Amino acid sequence: MAEMAHLVAARLRGLGASVELCPTSGHPVVYGEIDAGAPRTLVFYNHYDVQPPEPLDEWTAPPFGAEIRDGRIYARGVADNKGNLLTRLQATECWLRGAGSVPCNLRFVFEGEEEIGSPHLEEFTHRYGERLKGAVGVVWESGGKDASGRPAISCGVKGICYVELTARAANQDLHSSQAAIVPNPAWRLVEALHALKDVAADRCLVGGFYDAVRAPTATELALLRENPLEEQRMKANWGIDAFINGLTGLELSTKLLFQPTCTICGITSGYGGPGTKTVLPKVARAKIDCRLVPDQRATDIAAKIRAHLDARGFRDVGMEVLSAENPSQSPVDGALAQAALAAARATYGEDVRLQPRGAGTGPMFLFKEELGLDCVSGMGCGHAGAHVHAPDENVFVEDYFGTVAHVGRLLGGLGCARARRARGRQGGDVRSAPAA
Ligand SMILES: [Zn+2]
């Protein structure tokens, strides 16, 4: 991790940025500044950490070799998120080489703990937040083309409350004949899980769970209507006949992006291997994630889950909060979102989707809700078959350069205010963004 942080810092210094390795209780944040004396400042948020590459035998190229084959680059992190990180640096480099300066001031925030839930990023935003305030906004780390090859810009993320529930009984695994007289923690856990959700209605039963859920605005609904999900393709890809409760159309997109979830991510207890083993387990665990929407708060939801379990008689079931991140939403008609959309259309053509938010999670809240900076996501080189977090992670070389151009054009677009003013004074030409 330290080696990677130093590599990123060196690359940033090569652009003439002033760079600091900001220590946190975990891995450092690489922070860079380029001041061009421009009226506007833009922040880039990316991460230099990646998921582990295992299972190694399922890769067709070395995970850290960055092999280029058939128009694709194969490497762990090439889509999530080292590839995107580098497109920000190369777009900056294009401006510096082509025009001699960047059209807006830049702030680079490259953290090293995104893949484990950004547990210490708040230490950075608390200490360095003042240096970011007043920026036009934050270009988020992720993004790419959907299954039909269309780029998608979005302005928000869901939050997450990830908990582990533990039920215990005897102090050791027992012969299952003792089940006649000794409680089984696996059954106890199943009862507790059952108390959390009405599966038929697909509703979380935790008291107050939906209280803070904000309905989509008219503009957000219009965007959902304009950009329906590719239902047939999604169902075919995943091998399912129907979505939950037969949802389709606008109801389906609204459920995906504007409703929270309560999901059993995994259950472990006793023996799960081949054949039989007659055992009465001593412990049972379940991992649960709730994807949250504005204005739910992760710690509030965790407290509500605990209170709900207690009220339903499950005080004996332990609960540990493993991850808590709040959701975040920036306006889809904000200056940054519209500039990113215009730059996307100039790069890829008119067929670009703008959607209110993604269904995933990231620490946008620290920038938007705490520092007041709008965030825009989707300026990335990923694609539907990028195998993010999996073996053979890849991006198309063409999409990589497309993203460099997209980011470069965004800088140019945001810098127009300055160019227009300069032209007004001197009668000069507006400089256009250099090609990637
Ligand atoms: Zn990731």
Image (tube, helix red, strand yellow):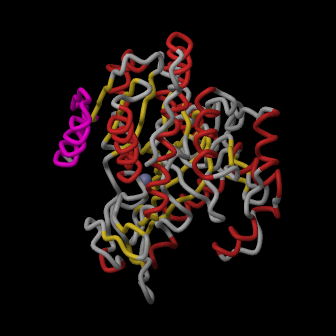
Q: Is residue 73 above or below residue 361?
A: below
The picture places residue 319, in percent across and down from the top left corner, at 46, 45
Nearest the camera: 367 or 429? 429
Q: Residue at x 37, y 28 (%)?
A: 107
Residue at 58% across, 38% down: 340
Q: Residue at x 56, y 27 (%)?
A: 374
Between 192 and 72, the residue placed more toward the observer is 72
Q: Is residue 116 magenta?
A: no
Residue 402 location, x and y as percent?
50, 53
Work out whether residue 126 can be spotted.
yes
| Left or right placement of residue 382 versus residue 305 in this view | left
Is residue 16 a member of the stretch shown in magenta? yes
Q: Quadrant of residue 281?
A: bottom left
Q: Residue at x 37, y 38 (%)?
A: 98
Q: Residue 10, how many percent across, how many down?
A: 19, 40
| Residue range highlighted in magenta | 2-29
